[in-house]
Image: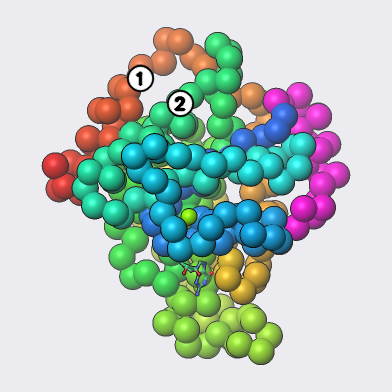
Amino acid sequence: MKNYRFQDIQSHIDRYNLLTPLDILLVGGTGTGKSSTLNALFNSTVAKVGEGVDPETQHVSAHSLHDYLRFHDSAGLGDGKENDYNHAKNITWELQRTCNTDYHFMDLTMVLLDGGSRDLGTAFQLLESVVLKAIEPQRVIVAINQADMAMKGRYWNTHSNKPEPTLVNFLEEKAHSVQHRINESTGLTINKPVYYSAKFHYNIHVLVDHIIHHFPTSRRIVYNHRESKGSDSNASGFLNVLNLL
Ligand SMILES: Nc1nc2c(ncn2[C@@H]2O[C@H](COP(=O)(O)OP(=O)(O)O)[C@@H](O)[C@H]2O)c(=O)[nH]1
Ligand SMILES: [Mg+2]
């Protein structure tokens, strides 16, 4: 995918005079497939699959697709209360960090949902209480990974590595319901999420189209007057909602 729509990416960034590269923070629970998604986008093994990111060091690793696009693999959530607290704090910090006094470092954030999971409650809380507190909704991309597992593996065609029509309908429905639920809980209208399978390289180009569709038309300016509750407060708010504190 390295060369996919490269000209479009380059000309968009040049046209709007954005800072290069465009930085995208990947966010999502442990096991949603952040690392696998990076590997699918890069078409090579750039991130270790099946390993969480060390919460002690709050390590975020950067991966440049090319000169214009860079992804950051954040620590996932779901490894217990203390780690979740650190992760939420870390995400807030990453989203609020600046690259100089004028602009934020992260241009966009991509929240990954596990299409195979029934319970997306934690992911929605993360979106609502952490992500959307730190970055504008237009800069939030939502995508559903593990499309192959949405119906527990049924209706996934293992020969073509594509969903059968029954699964396509189910996934469409799921994407609609995610969009609806985010609107219900936050009042914000996001674009309908795309669904893909990082493992089977299904719809990866659709994922990239979705990312490009969200490209901003201005740099992300740091407003000094902006009321900042700080990362600690956001993180504990998140855990309060989850009844974890
Ligand atoms: N079936 C299926 N499994 C996936 C997919 N993406 C990731 N996985 C698996 O989910 C597990 C966690 O993936 P990983 O990329 O490490 O998730 P991360 O913790 O968010 O970085 C691994 O066993 C992956 O092989 C997918 O699209 N379909
Ligand atoms: Mg990972």
The amino acid sitting under disc 2 is Gln
Quick check: is 207 in the magenta stretch?
A: no
Residue 174 on image: x %, y %: 45, 68
| Residue at (68% x, 85% y) in the render | 160
Q: Residues within 10 Å of mark 1 (few under 14, many from 20)?
A: few
Q: Earlier in the sequence, mark 1 or mark 2?
A: 2
User: What residue would you read off at disc 2?
Assistant: 96
The amino acid sitting under disc 1 is Ser
Q: Please state which of residues 171 and 3 is positioned toward the viewer in this rendering.
A: 3
User: What residue would you read off at disc 1?
Assistant: 228
Q: Residues within 10 Å of mark 2 (few under 14, many from 20)?
A: many
Q: Secondary structure at mark 1?
A: loop
Residue 237 on image: x %, y %: 23, 36
One can see residue 144 in this view: no
Q: Secondary structure at mark 2?
A: helix
Snapshot quadrant of residue 70: top right
Residue 80 on image: x %, y %: 24, 52
Q: Please state which of residues 14 and 78 is positioned toward the viewer in this rendering.
A: 78
State yes or no: Cβ of the residue under disc 2 lies below 8 Å from any atom of ligand 1: no
What is the C-alpha distance between the residues marked 1 and 2? Answer: 9 Å
Quick check: is 8 in the magenta stretch?
A: yes
